[in-house]
Amino acid sequence: MAATLEAPVAAPVEETFVPTPENPICLTARAATEVRDILEQQGNPEGIRLRIYVAGGGCSGLQYGMALDENVDEGDAFFPAYVQHGDLVEDTWTNLRFETEPSFGVVVDPMSLKYIFGSVVDYVTTPMGGGFKVENPNAVKACGCGSSFSTEEDAGTVTGGCGSCCSA
């Protein structure tokens, strides 16, 4: 039987998510739980952060990436994980509150930050499996499977599909 890791008590931050340089990205409680579970499976290594990044590629021009990383490079933004809690009822969040996650932080490189500032990272489970999904307010076009996106400045330059979704 696996040991259960109790999440440390988190302090409430505020009632609404307003992205700031100190808290540019938010995770849902499901996403934070998934990251904590992965860290627990790896023996809870010290100094590990969730790196969220954007890279060129994907059928919409840019694609999201996430990795556990112990490095913070020069110019990286490092901040506490900001976690959204609440109830999702018919696609509407109620009883919303936000807390900082004490067990891991988030790091984002400067190029990626301009594309994903204000995003909410969720973890979703489908019949095909589970994965992280990014709700990005800067995306004007997104891949049907949610793995890639484009912004206002490059929306008209990329066409095609990734083969795993219905984008055309």
Image (tube, helix red, strand yellow):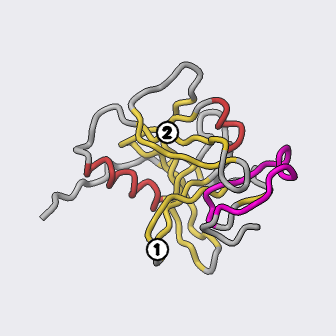
**Which residue is located at x 16 percent, y 61 percent?**
2
Indicate the quadrant where residue 112 lies. Answer: top right
Q: Is residue 26 left or right of residue 141?
A: left
**Which residue is located at x 79 percent, y 48 percent?**
151
**Which residue is located at x 87 percent, y 52 percent?**
156
Magenta region, main secondary structure:
loop
Q: Dot 2 lies on which element?
A: strand
Q: Residue furthest top?
A: 74
Residue 100 inside the magenta-drawn segment? no
**Which residue is located at x 45 percent, y 41 percent?**
50
Callout 2: 10 Å neighbours few (<14), some, many (20+)? Answer: many
Q: Is residue 14 left or right of residue 118?
A: left
Seen in the picture, residue 111 relative to 168 is either above or below; the reply is: above
Seen in the picture, residue 159 relative to 94 is either above or below; the reply is: above
The circle on residue 51 is: 2
Which residue carries the number 1 mark? 128
Q: Residue furthest bottom?
A: 90
> Magenta segment range?
145-162
The quarter of the picture where the C terminus appears is bottom right
Give the mark count.
2
User: Where does residue 104 sit, x and y in percent of width and height?
Assistant: 39, 41
Q: Tag 2 or tag 1, which sits nearer the N-term?
A: 2
Residue 159 inside the magenta-drawn segment? yes
Dot 2 amino acid type: Arg
Q: CA distance from mark 1 to mark 2?
A: 25 Å
Dot 1 amino acid type: Met
User: Where does residue 38 sit, x and y in percent of width and height?
Assistant: 33, 52
